Image (spheres, helix red, strand yellow):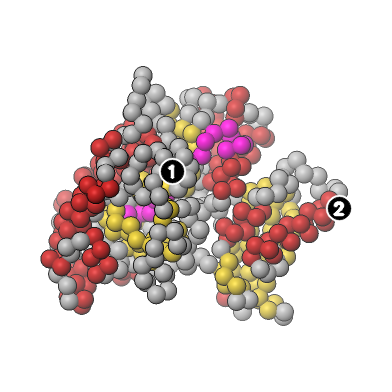
């Protein structure tokens, strides 16, 4: 059966001026709607503005920022814009460092969320004939239910496998003929490792062809290695629970940036220090304003995620702007000996070496000589640890390339495959900062 390449052709290919008119209408409605929350009424009073002051898209810069701390301080329902009786579901963070962040949804919000995810899945070739398997956790974690309802909206047979139990995941992939899989990048690598251990060839023994990856920053090198290992096309997904979860932005088949659905969001890139807007093409912090939410719209939410808007149009025909691959978070930046370092810089360097596996751990400590960085990185399963000269040469080469990339010299520990603990259910821990203990 012939399908359109677009899930919603009218919205996805809408001329830019029409899209911006739609954005302004939705922004003005959202700002008025936000006055139902005391939090925003106070913010507007402090700034001396009213909803009537928003006359153009540029006026979004007059609106107050919203932060994760605002959500925590107004826990649980202080930013609600509808009565609780109109809310259908909530999601929240773990709250391990205080109050969790709570996000409310009406029935319409959930339907729009499912549509956004369906649009993403359709864009990368998912169709009703496909079998979709979700290895994300269900419950408060938005990736589980977000992808579930999006896949159902596409019309696929869904396998809600949930997180963990990799052997079972592989059995489901083989037995149910899974063609589309959702997994975080570190877990996708784990699935391949277990397949090798069990003698499963993903190209020969499975029907996998599409992989949706996200939830943790990853380099282009890691994506390419996953594609090569599993024999799939791996598409980058961006979601954030405060916006809705998955479905905020997604790569198209061109794999050159993530289309962010601008009929759902106003997009800004700001300098995380000065808070001033940055032009397209410059790296900064992503700020999002929801314009299609009922229960809990958020104005100028500071995501802390670092990216840039890619200039120009995409050859796929979609008019929605593209975000570059995330470079990490502004609050995840490592400052060592006066140098600013992001873990993803280290990852992309490590993955240039076929002798290395994908798991690594950066440890920061304070010693007599000052702050130090040690990187434990696993060797590939087929690399022999008996050849001392080869190990020493590899260690020197890795150290040299890392110094060129991050401008300091880390201590490299090459460890056998399987040494570092890998969780089947959580994002991989990449940095352990022990400096605060001294």
Extreme-left residue of the structure: 52
As measured in the structure, the alpha-carbon distance from the residue carrying label 1 to the one carrying label 2 is: 43 Å
Where is mark 2, residue-wise? 388
Q: Earlier in the sequence, mark 1 or mark 2?
A: 1
- 401 or 292, which lies in front? 401
Q: Is residue 401 visible?
A: yes
Q: In this image, 344 relative to 106: left or right?
A: right
The secondary element bearing badge 1 is classed as strand
- 207 or 88, which lies in front? 207
Q: Is residue 135 visible?
A: no
| Residue lying at 36% horizontally and 39% vertically, measured from the top left | 317
| Residue lying at 17% horizontally and 70% vertically, measured from the top left | 41
Where is mark 1, residue-wise? 251
Q: Position of residue 202 (x, y in %)?
A: 59, 30
Q: Position of residue 82 (x, y in %)?
A: 16, 56
Q: Which residues are magenta?
A: 227-243
Question: Quarter holding the N terminus?
Answer: top left
The secondary element bearing badge 2 is classed as helix
| Residue lying at 65% horizontally and 55% vertically, measured from the top left | 349
């Amino acid at each position: 059966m012939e399908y359109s390449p677009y899930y919603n052709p009218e919205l996805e290919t809408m001329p830019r001026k029409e899209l911006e008119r739609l954005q302004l209408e939705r922004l003005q409605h959202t700002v008025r709607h936000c006055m139902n929350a005391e939090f925003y009424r106070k913010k507007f009073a402090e700034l001396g503005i009213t909803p009537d002051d928003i006359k153009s898209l540029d006026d979004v810069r007059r609106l107050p920022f919203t932060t994760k701390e605002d959500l925590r301080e107004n826990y649980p329902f202080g930013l609600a814009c509808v009565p609780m009786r109109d809310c259908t579901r909530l999601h929240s963070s773990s709250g391990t460092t205080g109050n969790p962040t709570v996000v409310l949804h009406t029935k319409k919000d959930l339907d729009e969320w499912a549509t956004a995810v369906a649009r993403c899945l359709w864009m990368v070739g998912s169709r009703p004939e496909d079998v979709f398997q979700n290895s994300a956790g269900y419950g408060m974690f938005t990736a589980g239910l977000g992808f579930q309802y999006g896949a159902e909206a596409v019309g696929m047979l869904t396998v809600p496998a949930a997180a963990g139990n990799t052997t079972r995941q592989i059995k489901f992939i083989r037995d149910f003929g899974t063609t589309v899989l959702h997994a975080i990048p570190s877990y996708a690598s784990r699935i391949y490792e277990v397949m090798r251990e069990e003698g499963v060839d993903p190209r020969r023994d499975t029907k996998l062809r599409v992989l949706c990856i996200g939830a943790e920053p990853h380099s282009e090198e890691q994506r390419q290695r996953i594609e090569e290992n599993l024999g799939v096309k791996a598409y980058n997904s961006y979601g954030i629970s405060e916006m809705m979860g998955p479905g905020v932005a997604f790569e198209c088949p061109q794999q050159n940036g993530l289309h962010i659905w601008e009929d759902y969001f106003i997009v800004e890139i700001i300098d995380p220090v000065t808070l001033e807007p940055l032009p397209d093409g410059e790296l900064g912090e992503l700020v999002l304003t929801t314009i299609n939410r009922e229960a809990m719209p958020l104005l100028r939410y500071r995501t802390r995620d670092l990216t840039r808007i890619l200039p120009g149009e995409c050859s796929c025909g979609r008019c929605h702007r593209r975000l570059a691959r995330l470079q990490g978070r502004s609050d995840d930046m490592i400052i060592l000996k006066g140098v600013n370092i992001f873990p993803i810089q280290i990852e992309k360097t490590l993955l240039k070496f076929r002798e290395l596996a994908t798991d690594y751990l950066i440890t920061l400590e304070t010693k007599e000589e000052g702050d130090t960085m040690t990187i434990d990185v696993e060797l590939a399963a087929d690399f022999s640890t008996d050849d001392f000269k080869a190990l020493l040469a590899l260690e020197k080469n890795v150290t040299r390339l890392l110094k060129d990339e991050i401008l300091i010299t880390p201590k490299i520990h090459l460890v056998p495959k399987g040494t570092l603990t890998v969780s089947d259910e959580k994002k991989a821990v990449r940095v352990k900062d022990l400096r605060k203990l001294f």
